[in-house]
Image: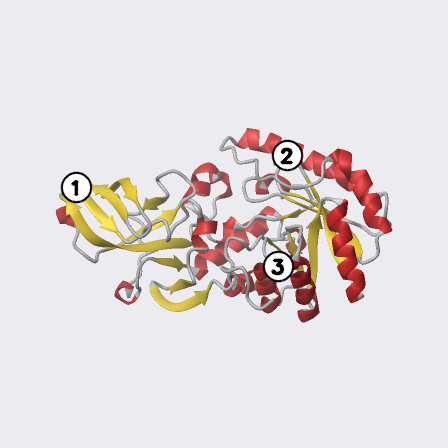
Amino acid sequence: METWYRVHNVDQVDTPALLVYPDRIVRNIDRALKFVDGRVDRLRPHIKTNKCKEVCQLLLQRGIGKFKCATIAEAELLGIAGAKDVLLAYQPVGPKIDRLMRLIEAFPDTHYACLVDNTDAALQLSARGMQKGRPIAVYIDVNVGMGRTGASIEQIERLVLDIQLLDGIQLVGVHGYDGHIHDKDYNLREQQSQKAYSVLETAYAMAQVSTTTPLTKVIGGSPSFPFHAERSDVECSPGTFVFWDFGYAENYAEQDFLVAAVLLTRVVSIVDHKHLCLDLGYKSVASESPQPRVKFFDQRIGEIKMQSEEHLVVEVRDSTDFKIGDALYCVPRHICPTVACYDELQVVNNGIADQVWKVLARGKKINY
């Protein structure tokens, strides 16, 4: 039976808690780098999974200097951590434009860029860039099939021309997120990834003819990572790999990353001879998916019967095998929103929980 996740001083850790294991995180980073043949310039990890300065620093220590993020808080976290190149993978509107400008001013050693997918947004960004006398770097966001954001191929040429006519912004690349690709079947995923790449490549060609400056291509997430990693002309943006989870482990086994984040919970009530109640409600683990939302290491834990805000009821063979306060360990189905449930991560080194890492970008704002 696996025991790597067990914490010897578990009596000192309150629950529910999210445990992380730095040695396994580092091994995952090295594994991700192997996918791109060690070329750190081709890996642009998305930090929406970890939201944590110390994890970003582990990535930086491995030579990774480019990052992607989804929020202004995450972008600020990367500036604090000392990242050199940050893509805010979001089209800022309203007050977010001013917040981005303040970040650009506050962290002059970090190169910030953002997404744009229409002329109205480009005009707003241009106006603020001209007002500040500092051009804003932009990537054209391309709809590669997800249908969430991004310009269509039919809109690309006009958008490129509009951007080129504007002062205050500078086109630096094209971006495509293929979050609609999540099939377990490897071959089908590969085919879908190729289709998404073809759309981005078409958009790139249309954009590149308008400028003598070499443009960058950024594409993909975790499910499509192995396929885009084989394309030497793109930057890849997986994020889940640092912690991994049982949902991705089941669906994308070929990636072979290690689970490096584990939930710790305790028995708070013995319901009857077949059921226990744990302190792991849906405020403590991502709840957008159907049950099971967690996978227990302890094989005595059976079906999840009920979950509410602060409680989780599970079925067991014999509840007399357990006592009040027993610690149990499980892996979430979806780690990214699970991390966002916690203010801090309990860091486990050699079986001892001996550090705390703040989830600094959990909220919407740090300083700017």
Mark 2 secondary-structure assignment:
loop
The disc at residue 64 is: 3
The three-letter amino acid code for the residue at tag 1 is Lys
- Residue lying at 28% horizontally and 63% vertically, measured from the top left: 10
The residue lying toward the viewer, choosing from 147 and 197, is 147
Q: Are marks 3 and 1 in contact (CB under 8 Å)?
A: no
Q: Are marks 3 and 2 in contact (CB under 8 Å)?
A: no
| The quadrant where residue 304 appears | top left
The three-letter amino acid code for the residue at tag 2 is Gly
What is the crowding at mark 1: few (fewer than 14 residues within 10 Å), some, or many (at least 20)?
A: some
Residue depth check, mark 3 versus mark 1: number of the one nearer the observer = 1
- Residue lying at 64% horizontally and 60% vertically, measured from the top left: 65
CA gap, disc 1 and disc 2: 47 Å
Q: Earlier in the sequence, mark 3 or mark 1?
A: 3
Reading the image, the residue beneath label 1 is: 274
Mark 1 secondary-structure assignment:
loop
Reading the image, the residue beneath label 2 is: 145
Image vertical order of residue 195 relative to residue 150, above or below: above
